[in-house]
Image (cartoon, rainbow, N blue to C red):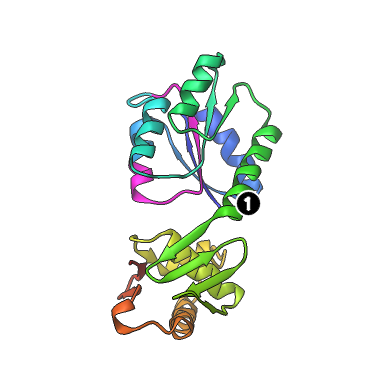
């Protein structure tokens, strides 16, 4: 799972990044609201930890801007603001949760896990006539079930989650295979071919395209 931390205090970012990476999460960070917004437009995140008081664009403004883009990524506010009105204001802006500074890392970690569980239980991804039910590990094409191996399912899900963005072979190896050293990325091509064959799509349903020399992109 990829978490974005938008926080202007370097010490807090370092503390959170170290703790969350030890728990197995992939972490990116931004130190002002504008930088955070630019990152969110370039790539997909599974959860956003968002400080309220930020330079250039504050957390409330950023939260509203994210939701205006129809981005439903869970957002947890990290803030010293603690009045009921401010809490309501943050939730109305589109935040999913709210934790007050100073906070316990263990409490934050549990809240993150809860959001990921909720997300996994309800998530349905679509790509053209393809439907992916995450919790059920189920793939349908034109309402017909397609049997994929665990790795095929993970690779297809990754491409669909990043729909519209080119996924390089190195990114796929790191994020799907969890390999962070030099490795023969040719194995990805083998799995892509297997997925295409099992999906049995028509020519006009070429939802997964090869970007020669780079990787793959999923598009409706």
In the rendered image, residue 200, in percent from the top left (x then y), is placed at 43, 84
Q: Would residue 138 be counted in the magenta stretch?
A: no
Residue 72 in which image quadrant: top left
- Locate residue 105, reporting x and y percent: 67, 33
Q: Is residue 48 left or right of residue 111?
A: left
Residue 185 in picture, x, y percent from top left: 46, 75
Location of residue 66 with respect to 158 vertically, above or below = above
Q: Residue at x 51, y 63 (%)?
A: 174
Can see residue 14? yes
Residue at 34% x, 27% y is 57
Q: Quadrant of residue 98?
A: top right
Q: How busy is the neighbourhood of tag 1: few (under 14 within 10 Å), some, or many (20 plus)?
A: few
Tag 1 secondary structure? loop
Span highlighted in magenta in the image: 38-54
- The residue lying toward the viewer, choosing from 49 and 71, is 71
Q: Quadrant of the C terminus?
A: bottom left
Residue, x 59% and y 36% (percent of image)? 16
The residue labelled by disc 1 is 24
Residue farthest along the front direction in this orientation: 143
Q: Nearer the viewer, residue 41 or 118?
A: 118
């Amino acid at each position: 799972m990829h978490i974005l931390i938008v926080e202007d205090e370097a010490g807090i970012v370092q503390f959170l990044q170290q703790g969350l990476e030890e728990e197995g999460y992939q972490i990116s960070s931004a130190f002002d609201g504008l930088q955070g917004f630019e990152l969110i437009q370039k790539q997909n995140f599974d959860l956003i930890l968002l400080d309220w008081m930020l330079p250039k664009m504050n957390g409330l403004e950023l939260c509203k801007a994210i939701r205006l883009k129809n981005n439903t990524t869970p957002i947890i506010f990290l803030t010293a603001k603690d009045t009921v009105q401010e809490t309501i204001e943050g939730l109305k802006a589109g935040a999913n949760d709210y934790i007050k500074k100073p906070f316990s890392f263990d409490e934050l970690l549990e809240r993150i896990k809860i959001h990921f569980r909720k997300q996994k239980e309800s998530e349905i991804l679509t790509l053209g006539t393809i439907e992916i039910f995450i919790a059920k590990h189920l793939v349908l094409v034109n309402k017909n079930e397609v049997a994929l191996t665990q790795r095929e399912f993970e690779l297809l899900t990754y491409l669909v989650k990043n729909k519209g963005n080119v996924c390089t072979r190195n990114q796929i190896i790191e994020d799907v295979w969890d390999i962070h050293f030099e490795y023969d990325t040719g194995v990805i091509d083998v799995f892509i071919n297997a997925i295409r064959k099992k999906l049995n799509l028509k020519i006009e349903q070429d939802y997964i395209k090869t970007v020669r020399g780079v990787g793959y992109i999923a598009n409706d």
